[in-house]
């Protein structure tokens, strides 16, 4: 697995190839088979990887909160929902909220989340590679491979499974 500090440089070298692979999958992959492949790789690779050693997702992007995430986060922090929103969040185009800052306001120095089990559902589900309809979200997956070593590795494994050879 690529070291998190090296992922940006390595992914930049593979960016064009990853987009070409995305196009290849769109034309050649069976959607149900691809979902099963991603789910298998997600389980295997994340089962062996300690995300707290990386947290590039938390360092580079804001956290996303659905309305349903706010109550548990507020309780965990010992503040009201209104205080949580006022201090840490801003509306995201009228749908949900994002944290005010990147790195995420709830990221601890050790890579853990201050919110623990009360972290937003989108954070728990990231990078969504074990969810259905991956063929419909391949653009996002390629983008996530730019900073997530596990997603990058998933794409590399899938290239092998599909026998994909990149030609410029």
Image (tube, rainbow, N blue to C red):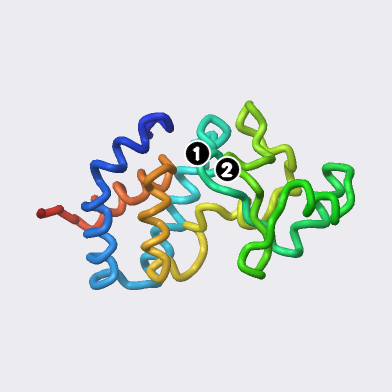
Q: Quadrant of the N terminus?
A: top left
Q: Is residue 123 left or right of residue 15?
A: right
Residue pictured at 87% horizontal, 48% vertical = 75
Q: Where is residue 153 drawn, in percent x and y?
A: 36, 44
Residue pictured at 63% horizontal, 63% vertical = 92
Residue pictured at 80% horizontal, 50% vertical = 84
Residue 106 occupies quadrant = top right
Query: Earlier along the polypeptide chain: callout 1 or callout 2?
Result: 1
Q: Is residue 137 left or right of residue 162?
A: right
C-alpha gap between disc 1 and disc 2? 10 Å
Q: Is residue 60 above or below residue 22?
A: above
Category of crowding for the residue at label 2, using alpha-carbon neighbours closer than 10 angstroms: few (below 14), some (14–19), many (at least 20): some
Q: Where is residue 23 drawn, in percent x and y?
A: 25, 66
Dot in front, 1 or 2: 2
Q: Contact (CB < 8 A) between labels 1 and 2?
A: no
Q: Secondary structure at mark 1?
A: helix
Residue where numbered disc 2 is placed: 102
Q: Is residue 103 above or below residue 93?
A: above
Q: Secondary structure at mark 2?
A: loop
Q: How many marks?
A: 2
Residue where numbered disc 1 is placed: 56
Q: Quadrant of the C terminus?
A: bottom left
């Amino acid at each position: 697995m690529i070291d998190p500090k090296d992922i940006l440089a390595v992914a930049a070298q593979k960016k064009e190839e990853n987009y070409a692979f995305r196009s290849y999958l769109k034309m050649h992959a069976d959607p149900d088979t691809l979902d099963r492949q991603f789910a298998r790789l997600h389980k295997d690779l994340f089962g062996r990887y300690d995300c707290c050693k990386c947290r590039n997702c938390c360092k580079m992007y804001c956290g996303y909160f659905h309305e349903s995430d706010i109550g548990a986060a507020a309780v965990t922090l010992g503040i009201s929902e209104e205080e949580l929103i006022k201090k840490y969040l801003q509306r995201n185009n009228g749908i949900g909220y994002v944290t005010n800052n990147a790195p995420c306001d709830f990221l601890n120095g050790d890579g853990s989340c201050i919110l623990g089990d009360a972290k937003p559902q989108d954070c728990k589900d990231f990078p969504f590679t074990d969810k259905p309809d991956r063929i419909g979200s391949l653009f996002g997956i390629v983008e996530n491979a730019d900073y997530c070593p596990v997603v990058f590795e998933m794409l590399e494994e899938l290239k092998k499974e599909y026998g994909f050879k990149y030609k410029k």
